[in-house]
Image (spheres, rainbow, N blue to C red):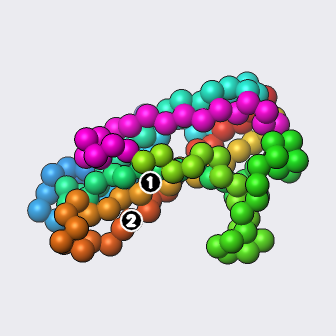
Amino acid sequence: MMKMVVSLSRALLLSVILIQNLCAEEDSPKPFLVETDLPRASVFPVGAEISFKILLCFPDTYSYQGSSIYAYLFNLPGNFVDVTGKEINTDYYGKKWAAVRIKPMVWLPAAQRKLREHTGSFSTQGWPPGDYCLTLSGFFQGSNREDKLPDKYVSTSILFSLE
């Protein structure tokens, strides 16, 4: 039992070190990362306003332009569209990947685009109870247009239940 606790402690310490190294200042390019501070599988009452921090990691040569929230139909309760009246989008990948927009792109003012932490929120007013997996998609662009760096979209899941 003691060995298991020590192994678990080492694994947790190693994961903390790895995450810190992901965002550490280095000469090599840093990866892009978008996360939230919402605990996985949180439970909220129907109609709740869900607020969270958006935690970012990106190279200094880029800036965070903003984010949007959407959900694929297969990640929502079966009656979501009927209850909410949200419009289904099948434009990009057809019916298999049908999605609904939860929150349109929120563009940040230029002064906030280098910050590594932002806030986000959405309302579940009028949503049915059930399990949800939403996608928070962050958009990054090169800070200097002359560098011609490719745009980057990086996503993370927001998992929760409404009761």
Residue 115: say if magenta. Answer: yes
Picture disc at residue 159 = none
The location of residue 34, given as percent across then percent down, is: 42, 50
Residue visible at 73% across and 30% down in the picture: 125
Disc 1 marks which residue? 138
Asked whether 30 or 125 is in front, the reply is 125
- Secondary structure beneath dot 1 equals strand
Disc 2 marks which residue? 152
How far apart are labels 1 and 2 at the CA level? 8 Å
Q: Earlier in the sequence, mark 1 or mark 2?
A: 1
Residue 70: say if magenta. Answer: no
The location of residue 163, given as percent across then percent down, is: 78, 28
The location of residue 153, given as percent across then percent down, is: 44, 62
Residue visible at 18% across and 71% down in the picture: 146
Magenta stretch, residue numbers: 108-128
Residue visible at 63% across and 27% down in the picture: 49
Residue visible at 37% across and 52% down in the picture: 65
Residue density around tag 1, few if under 14, some if 14–19, many if 20 or more, within 10 Å = many
Q: In the rendered structure, which amino acid carries the disc numbered 2? A: Lys
